[in-house]
Image: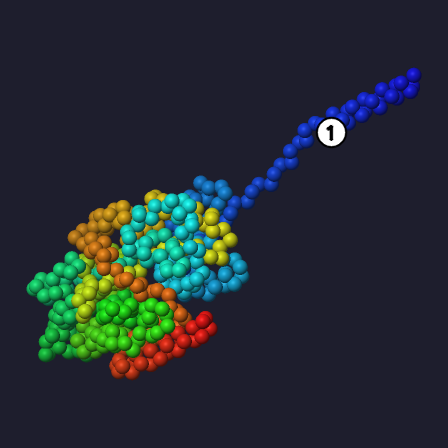
Amino acid sequence: MKSKMWLTAAVLLIVSMVIASCAPKAATPAAPKEPVKITIFVGFGTGTSPEQQAVHKEMQDLYNSTHKDIQIEFLTVPWAERITKYSTMLAADQPPDILMPIGVGGISQFYRGWKDLTPYIQADKYDMTRFAGKTVEIHNYPGQGVLGLPMCVYPTAIYYNVDIFDAAGVDYPPTKFGAPYADGDAWTLAKMVEIAKKITLDANGNDASSPAFDAANIKQFGWNGWDWSNTIEFAMKFGDENGSGVSKDGKTSLLNTKQYLDAMNFGKDTIWTWRIRASGEQSGAFYQNAGDPMGSGMVGMWEIHTWMGWAYSSWSEKFAWNIAAVPAGPNGKIIDMVDADTAVIPAASKHPKEAWEVMKWFYEPAQYKKLIDNYVCLPADKEAMKSWVGEQQAKFPGVNFDVFVEALDYVETYNHESWKPNYSKVNDAMNTAWGHISSGDNLDVEAVMKAAHEEVQKLLDEYWAANP
């Protein structure tokens, strides 16, 4: 009897074990997937002010609240520290995933360190026709592909102080590119000088064309040159070569060519012969409390980029102003200098696909407009460009913002910030050369440019010797 009971129990035990082994096992909870973090580096262009950082934070919070698999974080670095910080991140194998906004100059400083976006653009059939044609060309680099989507474009135009012109009884410069001046003469640099003399005044009210003009006691200047930093990139307007100071193949300095000598002599004469432009010392004395030269109320004309938009409101509080077309150079050509901002993905990024998805989000209409407004720039997107003109004219009635749109038809064919060997050192040499002229430290243009040429050529030769 006991043996039967034991046998029955054993059978039941075996059956229960078989059933248990066949029963489905409880699933082990999977560990939650960590979202990919995309770091956005800001510091190579605008976007670093407290107000702009606040907008970035709003956009960061919006993105992170509406996306689970990817999260973003802005990293803002002061302009002066951008090169060191970014280089350090690369060296530590902790690269950011997107840099924006960044211009041609910033791209050039790390020229071969960016991801070609062409495969992503093609795979997604991304519509590049939404951007104005010239803006696409700027970010298409030979041998490297499309390095960024066009974001902001900053053409130059002539800002002029209407009150100064009215007080002198002088006609305004033309608003249409290629149009003549009011008296029928061609609108050229030579004509600009003629007009600038009439609105350059000494303390006694004599203009610079008067024999009684006191050059030692100038209270108002007719012209403030090109751009903010007054480098010699404006040499592009004096011939067929580009304004980077170096041949397109990066092997030959252009600083001893007739084109660059002509440009520097012109620059020298605007300050020291015609007296229509402040010297380096005068600029500091007159403009340091204004925030910018135009804002001083003592400048009649200034050719500079649309990124001066941050100053428009302060100008309007002090004087009436408007925008005119860029004059033609000595060879009759109209060349508009343009800066352009974009967003790029470092080649070293560990999450390029996710970075591309984030980039596309920033270029969607709502986010794109928020960025454009934050950076105070002319949008590269054609539809947004139309809206921008209307919005600016509503803010500043009577100011002709259409000039900037037309300027895009005259953009330099080879950007003045394009890559060259030993990029920063070559630029330093060029800036030093102009500094000698603008300060009056050395007005021997040929000697200054010869020295700069030799220094730049040495830098180029050293680069190619190390990178055959």
Residue picked out by circle 1? 21
262 with respect to 57 (left or right): left
- Look at the image and tell me in which quarter the N terminus lies: top right
Q: Percent from the top left, x then y, of residue 300?
A: 18, 66
Q: Is residue 212 above or below residue 198?
A: below
Amino acid under disc 1: Ser
**Closest to the observer: 237 or 172?**
237
Q: Quadrant of residue 288?
A: bottom left
Residue at x-position 11% and y-position 74%: 209
Residue at x-position 38% and y-position 50%: 55
Q: Percent from the top left, x then y, of residue 435?
A: 30, 76
Q: Examine the rendering and report whether any part of residue 109 can be seen.
A: yes
Q: Examine the rendering and report whether any part of residue 436 can be seen.
A: no
Q: Quadrant of residue 109?
A: bottom left
Q: Percent from the top left, x then y, of residue 4?
A: 89, 18
**Closest to the observer: 32 or 311?**
32
Residue at x-position 39% and y-position 56%: 145
Q: Residue furthest top?
A: 1
**Closest to the observer: 277 or 193?**
193
51 with respect to 294 (left or right): right
- Look at the image and tell me in which quarter the C terminus lies: bottom left
Task: Classify mark 1: helix, strand or loop.
Answer: helix
Q: Is residue 10 above or below residue 393?
A: above
